[in-house]
Image: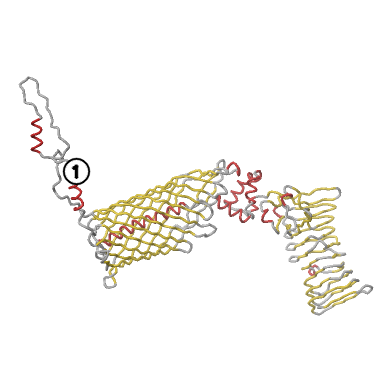
Amino acid sequence: TISISSTEGFSSLVDITGGLITKLQVEGASTNTLDLSGGSISELSFMSSGTNALTVGGTLSLNRITQSSGVTDVNLWNDDHFTDTMVSGGVLNFNNQDFNLIDGAVMRLTSADAVVNFKGTNTAVKSGAQLDLGAGRTTANALTVESGGSVRSTVYGSNGIVSVGSLEADQLTLDVGASWRLYNDGTFTDYESLLNSNAFLLGVSTNAITHGLTSSDVELIGEGMDAYWLYSINDLVVTNEGSLYKLYARYGMQNLGEALNAEGDFLTLMNLMQSEVDTNVDLQNALINYGSADAASSAITDGFLRTTEMGSTLVGAQSVLADQIGVRTREHLRSFRLAGKTGPSGARGPASWWDRSMNRLHDALPSFNLRDSMRFAQDRTSEPTVSDERPSVKKPWISGVQGGAIPSFTSEIVIPSHYQTWGRAYVADLDQESTDGFAGYDASVRGGVLGVDRRFDHAVVGVAGGMSKTIVTGGDGHSGEADSLQSTVYASYFTDRVYLNAHISFASSDVETDGVSMFGYRSEYDANSLSFFVGAGIGYKGFNDGVMITPEVSLLSSKYSRDGYTSSSSMSQTLGFEDMVFDSYDQWSYQSELGVAFSSIKLIENTRLQMAFQPEFRVHWVHEFEPNPDGERYEFVGSTQALHAQLQSREENLIRLGGGVRCWNWNSQTTEFGLNLDHLKGDAYTEWMFSGHFIHRF
């Protein structure tokens, strides 16, 4: 580091032709003259309060120049000598020749006390260069900002008055493709007072101002500006005030699409909302209250380009129902033929219960005695008389008392041991985490199903029906409820080791949904779910015939469909939101499962309870073949522009772990009870399902 200092009354003269200098520091209160023609200087710093004269040329390599005070006259230079220049105070003059701020170069004025004067005929800010006016003052004869070049100026305030770094030129030209950034330093905060005004003075010219800028080329950034994201530079205005031309940046409502970097459906939505936002102050304030463009973009996307994940949830509810039917047929197979009988086959039928019931009915209702009834009928019949008239026929009156006309049941009735009734109650909780810009959702499915089936030698056929309630709570504010009625027809064919299962299920749902509360949309519609299930497995005995091992594979195909509907907003009067008219919609899900079930053949018995218990453990890999549902199409009332509410992708690969236990009484194996717990887990999806069941065998 070399320090040069002039004292009052004495001048310094420095001539450098070579060498490697880290920092050359110029100080003093008098005059310093520097002639630099060779060597390398990392930083040249002017700190004197006097005047400096600088000539640079030759083979000199100069990386950085700073000035904090005094007056410096640059009388000769090459453009590549001023690639990093900072003026924090004082005056920097470029005399006698044109100045080009070349590609990659930056010139900064960092305070209101900084002044730069370009005194040559022409000054140019080249492509890739930046002239940072800061809060200082810059002058030129003719200044041109070429395409790709940029200007930056600081917006600051004092006593509620806004000020901007000053640019003055006899002729000011801003080419198409140039840009300008206004940086707020935080000292001015009353931006609402600037709305719809020529708020920022960019440049002043005594001759002419020519520019090819658009409002999008001028950006207002800096401290606290996110809070005013809806407002920005929306126009550029050149005025003629006496002998001066002035270029102003006008502050006001900006284009929503540009403010939020919108594209696709989001851009279409912004264009539809623009006219309402321009005139509706309530809507403007509501959007401003989000605090930033990113927050507003996220909220608008959630409100208008997302919807309640009812389709995926009701498809999931079909999967839950399929599990109930699947467990039912598995229990039946465990009880009968597959890999040997592993559970109770049930009594031959509830004959004793039937007989007891019939005897009670016999005691309570009248019986029939033919002889006594006939005698009583004869006693009530009059003696015949001779007459040409045909006598009337009188029928006996039968009393409804003990010994009356209803015959007793004496023979034992035996119901064939082929029928079973069963019921299941279940609760499932689903948690879909946020993925790919979607907020995720939680859902619960609670329901029950009752069924009856008939067993044949190698098959079982049955029907079942039930109801469930599904509740969805979205992380983005969407929510909904569905009340569903379900019906199922199922069948299973089995041999000593192999089984095939199939069922068809249909659910009809009444759905109510609520959108994001800020926008107040609510809707009601009908939806249907239809599913087809096929499965197969083979049973093996293992571990000394103590465990039945059943590899299983299945495919569940589910179709969700709903009617078209209209979603209305409670904010239509204040915020001006039109109703959304949704098209009818359907989506398919194809879900396969591959896994194995382990069921104990040897029973766990409790002598105190006189009950037998049979545990089971299951593990399956679940794969979804259609993880990406289509968006739901809608239009605003009065518009023909189509928009799409996108749906979150379903998890593609999951692991299901489950376990359960069945139990029955030793003395009466007619009725069986059981509990099951299953856990479904993916990268961003979790499901817990708890169910209980009973089976009564006739």
Measuring from the top left, give residue 528's x and y in whole percent: 41, 48
What colouring method underlies this structural image? secondary structure
From the viewer's perspective, is residue 14 above or below residue 476?
Answer: below
Residue 443 at what x, y percent from top left?
46, 55
Nearer to us in this view, 689 or 57: 689
| Residue toward you, 17 or 160 | 160
For this view, does 403 lie left or right of residue 198? left
Which image quadrant is residue 621 in? bottom left
Instruction: Determine which residue is flagged by label 1.
Output: 364
Query: Crowding at label 1, few (<14), some or many (≥20) Cα neighbours within 10 Å?
Result: few
| Image quarter (top left, top right, bottom left or bottom right) of the C terminus | bottom left
Q: Nearer the viewer, residue 72 or 430?
A: 430
Quarter of the picture holding the N terminus: bottom right
Label 1 secondary element: helix
Instruction: Please tell me in which quadrant of the rendered image residue 53 appears.
Output: bottom right
Note whether 77 is above or below 566 in the view shown: below
The image shows a total of numbered marks equal to 1
Which residue is at 75% across, 48% downward?
197
Locate residue 41, reporting x and y percent.
Answer: 79, 75
Most extreme residue toward the right is 9
119 horizontally vs 452: left or right: right
Toward the bottom, the furthest residue is 19
As drawn, which residue projects farthest toward the top?
Answer: 388
The spot of residue 79 in percent (x, y) is: 80, 67
In this view, 340 is above or below 194: below
Viewed as shown, does residue 258 lie left or right of 403?
right
Which three-letter amino acid code belongs to the residue tagged 1? Ala
